[in-house]
Image (cartoon, rainbow, N blue to C red):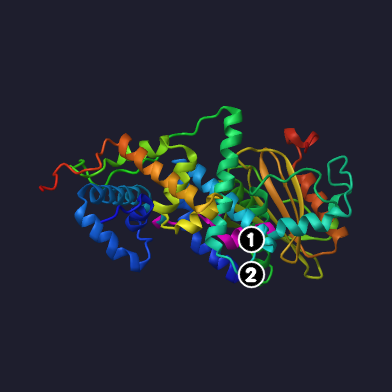
């Protein structure tokens, strides 16, 4: 039991990070993580301890987030858009991506692309784990990832090729 | 050289390509600057996403997200539900007449009451074991005690008289409480001639100020909690349920005397 709680505790920072990136709102994100942890702890009987705790927690979190989006859509609420991290580099340089612009671009991605992109690019999960968490076959995950990256490229106006072209 | 599929390039950019395929991809990229630029862009996107959000994981984790605390809260909730489910009884009158064994008729205020009960029982367990330092201000300094605690809690607090139940006031102390409910709590301690002790744990009202009731058996102690628009109060002890019930009724009656909400102390 305490071993189980330790494993969960070790995942909390990553869950908060992922939730913050999904919701862009610190309070909503922590509420989401709290719901996720409560569910995980109260349902540990259904959990097979052989499986990875981290992937299981991310699955719960994502499902709660999707459920919440569904019900808030029904209520017609909007989610506060705040807590954009301050760019640590002041001015965009050629070849660099403006962070605020990127944050907005991620915001406009379809949810299926956003959740996949963040699992890979932010959480560093393997494609296989991410596919399982999102609940789609590996090929579908890869195509969502590809579309997300192409969309970000278009929206941030960063050409695939750097300004300095390789001289042939 | 044959073209490398985009998924393979992406796996390379994400560091997820099997080691034995890396060399071939790097050779391809060296010969195909457009593909190399795309891979570089993906990596910049990944770096930028990390720059945006990675710092969140380094922030201190709020107490409410600590698994151990959550597990304790869930366990206490479970015990309560199972323990009282068999004996659901209607609460009438002031709501206390029949209730000690009854499960709550209404959902407890989520979270806050659980935390307060846990705090109250913990404070009870810590200080009833003390002899010389059981209280901070003794009952002999009664007027000072009630004035002081009332000021600190910013709400009038008179120590209930439990002599009819055979308990006399030992004294009281100020305790750190839960942050978002004033951050302070008062503990009053009572003792019977047989050296049995009960404590009454009082804080200012919760922000929502909604009336609420809850019986709990927490950490080996019986606790009766209620909240109204003015205060929250938890009576804690290890006496038999009948006597705890009588004491709680007396405390409730005296602390809600004259309150506007006393006439209708609860609702669903």
Q: Position of residue B146 (x, y in %)?
A: 64, 50
Q: Tell me if residue A5 can be seen.
A: yes
- Say which residue appears at 52% left-offset and 63% top-offset: A9
Count the marks: how many? 2
Nearer the observer, B231 or B63: B63
Q: Which secondary structure, mark 1?
A: helix
Whether pointer 2 and pointer 1 mark residues with C-beta atoms closer than 8 Å, the reply is yes
**Magenta highlight on residue B72:** yes
Res A1 label: 2
Asked if residue A43 is positioned above or below residue B193 in the image, the reply reads above
> Which quadrant of the figure has residue B246?
bottom right
Nearer the observer, B267 or B7: B7
The magenta span reads: B58-74
Distance of label 2 from label 1 (alpha carbons) = 10 Å
| Quarter of the image where the N terminus of chain B is located | bottom left
Q: Is residue B145 left or right of A90 when viewed as pictured?
A: right
Q: Tell me if residue B181 can be seen.
A: no
For this orientation, the residue located farthest to the left is A167
Q: Which secondary structure, mark 2?
A: loop
| Quarter of the image where the C terminus of chain B is located | top right
Q: Is residue A40 left or right of B15 when viewed as pictured?
A: right
Res B71 label: 1
For this orientation, the residue located farthest to the top is A76
- Say which residue appears at 65% left-offset and 38% top-offset: B209
């Amino acid at each position: 039991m305490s071993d189980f709680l330790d494993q969960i505790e070790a995942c909390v920072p990553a869950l908060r990070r992922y939730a913050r990136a999904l919701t862009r709102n610190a309070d909503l994100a922590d509420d989401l993580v709290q719901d996720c942890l409560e569910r995980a702890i109260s349902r540990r009987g259904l959990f097979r301890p052989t499986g990875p705790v981290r992937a299981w927690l991310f699955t719960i979190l994502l499902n709660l987030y999707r459920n919440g989006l569904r019900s808030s859509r029904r209520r017609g609420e909007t989610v506060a858009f705040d807590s954009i991290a301050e760019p640590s580099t002041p001015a965009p340089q050629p070849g660099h991506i403006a962070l605020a612009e990127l944050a907005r671009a991620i915001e406009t991605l379809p949810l299926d692309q956003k959740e996949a992109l963040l699992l890979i690019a932010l959480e560093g999960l393997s494609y296989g784990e991410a596919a399982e968490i999102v609940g789609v076959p590996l090929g579908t995950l890869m195509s969502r990832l590809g579309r997300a990256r192409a969309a970000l490229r278009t929206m941030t106006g960063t050409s695939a090729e750097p300004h300095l072209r390789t001289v042939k | 050289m044959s073209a490398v599929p985009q998924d393979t390039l992406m796996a390379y950019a994400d560091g997820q390509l099997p080691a034995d395929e890396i060399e071939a991809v790097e050779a391809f990229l060296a010969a195909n600057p457009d593909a190399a630029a795309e891979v570089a862009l993906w990596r910049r996107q990944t770096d930028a996403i990390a720059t945006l959000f990675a710092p969140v994981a380094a922030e201190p984790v709020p107490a409410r997200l600590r698994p151990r605390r959550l597990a304790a809260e869930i366990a206490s909730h479970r015990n309560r539900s199972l323990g009282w489910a068999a004996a659901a009884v209607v609460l009438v009158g002031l709501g206390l007449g029949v209730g000690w064994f009854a499960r709550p008729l209404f959902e407890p205020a989520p979270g806050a009451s659980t935390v307060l009960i846990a705090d109250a029982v913990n404070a009870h367990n810590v200080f009833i074991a003390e002899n010389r330092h059981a209280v901070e201000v003794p009952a002999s300094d009664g007027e000072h005690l009630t004035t002081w605690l009332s000021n600190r809690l910013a709400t009038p607090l008179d120590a209930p008289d439990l002599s009819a139940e055979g308990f006399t006031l030992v004294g009281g102390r100020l305790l750190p409480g839960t942050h978002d409910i004033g951050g302070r709590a008062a503990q009053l301690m009572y003792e019977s001639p047989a050296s049995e002790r009960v404590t009454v744990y009082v804080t200012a009202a919760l922000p929502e100020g909604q009336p609420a009731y809850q019986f709990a058996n927490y950490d080996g102690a019986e606790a009766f909690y209620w909240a109204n628009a003015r205060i929250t109060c938890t009576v804690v002890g290890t006496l038999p349920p009948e006597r705890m019930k009588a004491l709680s009724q007396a405390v409730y009656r005296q602390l809600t005397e004259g309150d506007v909400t006393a006439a209708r102390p609860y609702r669903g």
